[in-house]
């Protein structure tokens, strides 16, 4: 019996457990407890452990269900851990700026460095079976002898993707440096982290997403040209539903 392909994961749950909930816990839970019960009621380390539990738990669950290590869970765990440690050690706000810039920069470096490997990371972000009908694409590329041309196309999309993470690193540093001015372990620090997180969706996510969309669209349009497939045949869920015959 052929091996079953991994179950497709939910992007919404991925972002919720690996990013949104941990950040909300770090920035909102502690102030809420202090407001209701008073200061020094709960150890900041306990808040950090709760926040870390979400990406860690989701990563373990995802591995059990799909037998694949969830990269976003690993990044989410590391991101929350770094933020929590800076707060617990009461370090200067500049370290938040360094941390915020380091994560996208590291991702971009890893994507660029993996280009010549047997499993480049661009396939995780753009050319993966969660989005595209990879099996059908590979079949058509082989039939038309366009595999080499597709690799060149994938490299161009990789450069655009790396540029998006480089832009994210720069914007992250500038935004964090401007907003997070209080030392870790203070109420002001938590509030500034929350403000930075909210503004990042406008200042950082929008421009970097534009670059990612450009990279994805360039990949899709080039793939349609090289395979002869229509858009509906490339993207999962894009095919119109067929009405049942009466």
Image: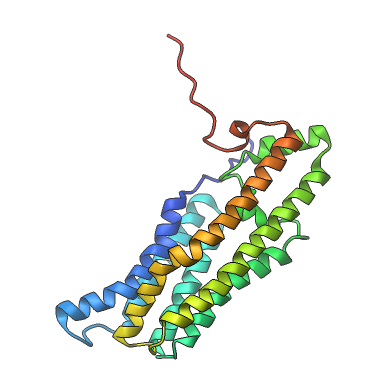
Indicate whether 42 appears above or below 128: below
Query: Residue, x 41% and y 90% (percent of image)?
Result: 89
Q: Could you tell whether 171 is left or right of 191 in the image?
A: right
Q: Quadrant of residue 23?
A: bottom left
Q: Could you tell whether 242 is left or right of 152 in the image?
A: left
Query: Residue, x 59% and y 32% (percent of image)?
Result: 232
- Residue 70 appears anywhere in the view: no
Q: Could you tell whether 237 is left or right of 110 in the image?
A: left
Q: Could you tell whether 224 is left or right of 54 in the image?
A: right
Question: Where does residue 217 sit, x and y in percent of width and height?
Answer: 63, 46
- Residue 210 appears anywhere in the view: yes
Indicate whether 96 appears above or below 12: below
Query: Residue, x 62% and y 51% (percent of image)?
Result: 214
The quarter of the rendered structure image containing the C terminus is: top left
Outermost residue toward the top? 246
Question: Where does residue 215 sit, x and y in percent of width and height?
Answer: 64, 52
């Amino acid at each position: 019996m052929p091996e079953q392909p991994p179950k497709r994961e939910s992007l919404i749950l991925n972002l919720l457990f690996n990013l949104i909930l941990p950040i909300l816990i770090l920035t909102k839970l502690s102030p809420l407890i202090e407001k209701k019960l008073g200061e020094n009621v709960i150890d900041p380390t306990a808040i950090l452990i709760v926040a870390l539990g979400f990406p860690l738990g989701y990563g373990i669950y995802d591995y059990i269900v799909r037998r694949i290590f969830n990269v976003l869970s690993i990044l989410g765990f590391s991101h929350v851990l770094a933020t929590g440690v800076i707060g617990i050690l009461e370090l200067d706000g500049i370290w938040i700026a360094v941390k915020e810039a380091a994560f996208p920069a590291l991702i971009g470096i890893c994507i660029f460095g993996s280009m010549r490997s047997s499993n480049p990371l661009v396939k995780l972000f753009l050319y993966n079976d969660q989005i595209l009908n990879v099996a059908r694409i590979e079949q058509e590329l082989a039939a038309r002898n366009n595999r080499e041309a597709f690799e060149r196309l994938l490299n161009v999309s990789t450069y655009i993707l790396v540029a998006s993470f480089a832009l994210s690193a720069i914007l992250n540093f500038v935004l964090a440096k401007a907003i997070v001015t209080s030392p870790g372990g203070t109420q002001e620090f938590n509030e500034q982290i929350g403000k930075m997180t909210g503004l990042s969706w406008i200042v950082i996510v929008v421009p970097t997403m534009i670059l990612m969309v450009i990279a994805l669209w360039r990949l899709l349009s080039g793939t349609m040209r090289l395979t002869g497939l229509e858009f509906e045949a490339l993207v999962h869920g894009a095919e119109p539903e067929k009405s049942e015959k009466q």
